[in-house]
Each structure stands twice: as C-alpha cells, then as structure tokens.
Image (cartoon, rainbow, N blue to C red):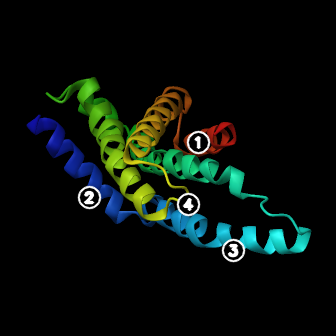
Amino acid sequence: MKKLVIASGALFRELVGDFMMVVCIIAPILMGIAFRFLIPVLENVLCLYFHLPQIIRPYYAVFDLLLAVMTPVMFCFAGVLVILEEIDYGVAKYFFITPLGKKGYLVSRIGIPSFISFFYTILLLTIFSITSTGFTEKIIYAAGGCIMALMISIFVVAYAKNKMEGMALVKLSGLFI
C-alpha cells in the first residue's frame, strides 16, 4: 500500500506541473456550472420561443449522467497521458521491475485517479445536478462513470503507441460516450 501511495504522489506532482492535466481536473467544474445554470435558461428561452411547456426538461437526467461520466473520464485521461508519456520516454518499463510491479503501476496511474474521481463526481453531482436525484442514484452514477472511465483508460493504454495516438483514442471514445 505504501508503494501505491508513493507512486500516486509522483503522479499528482506531475499532474500539477502540466497545465493540460490541471484543465482535466477543472473541466468537470466548468461543465457542471454550464449544466446547472445555462441549461435551465436555454429551456426557458426555447419554451418561450416554441410556446411549449417543456422541451429539454425531460432530458435533464442525461446531463447529470454526462457529468457523472465525463468527470472520471477526465481524471483517468490525465493518468493515461502520464502513462503514455512515460512509455514515450521509456520510463514505464523501469517501473514494472520495481516492487510496485505492473499491476501496482496501473493502479497508481489509473486506479487511484478513478477512485478519487468517484468522490469528486458525487460532490459535483451534489452541487450541480439539475434533477432531484437521491444520494443512492448519485453513487450509482459515479460508480458507473468510474467503471466506464477505467474501461476507456485500459483500452487507450493497450492500443495507443504514443501520447498523440492516446489523445486521438480518448477523443474517439468520447464519441461513444
């Protein structure tokens, strides 16, 4: 466990040093603000324009689900970029022969950010949810988002040969989301 904490600490120090990685952590907040405050305004404008009682309101849960999925995806995306950068520099293979091992390396780079994003997602859904979902639903949304983010991360790490291919695969997987 101590090995994972040390390896994860190195990951977070690297994340803070890269502006793009910091944006991956701030982007869900911006998305939550947009969903919470702009979508209801857009609903009112569209209802007035088309003279209908509701247009987007039946789909509010979809926006909550999108926030619940994109938050872990953004966190894991940052971890995937670190992995691909370490593969590009040839450093990753040296982590595999340390006591951390291959599984510990993947857990520290993808698993720990996914675990943290679970709680971050619950917090964001509590603050920015536009539906009246209960706490149990928020936990289910966050868990589903983390599972999806883990699957996408493993897919990208398995098939990307470098950081550029990894970014393209993450964007391609965003289409499927």
User: Residue 173: x and y, percent?
Assistant: 63, 38
Query: Disc 4 and disc 2: Cα gap in Å?
Result: 34 Å
Q: Quadrant of the N terminus?
A: top left
Taking the spot 70% from the left edge, 57% from the top edge, the residue there is 57
User: Residue 20: x and y, percent?
Assistant: 48, 62
Q: Quadrant of the C terminus?
A: top right
Q: Earlier in the sequence, mark 1 or mark 4?
A: 4
User: Residue 172: x and y, percent?
Assistant: 67, 40
Q: Earlier in the sequence, mark 3 or mark 2?
A: 2
| Label 3 sits on residue | 41
| Label 1 sits on residue | 170
Few, some or many residues within 10 Å of mark 2 (<14, 14–19, 20+): few
Q: Earlier in the sequence, mark 4 or mark 2?
A: 2
Mark 4: amino acid? Ile
Q: Earlier in the sequence, mark 1 or mark 3?
A: 3
Viewer can see residue 23:
no
| Label 4 sits on residue | 130
Task: Indicate the secondary structure of the residue bearing disc 4.
Answer: loop
Mark 3: amino acid? Val
Q: Is residue 42 above or below residue 90?
A: below
Viewer can see residue 143:
yes
* Front residue of 171 and 70: 70
Q: Nearer the viewer, mark 2 or mark 1?
A: 1
Query: Disc 1 and disc 4: Cα gap in Å?
Result: 27 Å
Q: Earlier in the sequence, mark 2 or mark 1?
A: 2
Few, some or many residues within 10 Å of mark 1 (<14, 14–19, 20+): many
Q: Nearer the viewer, mark 4 or mark 2?
A: 4
Dot 2 and dot 1 residues touching (CB under 8 Å):
no
Q: Is residue 65 above or below residue 127?
A: above
Task: Indicate the secondary structure of the residue bearing disc 1.
Answer: helix
Q: Which mark is residue 118?
A: none
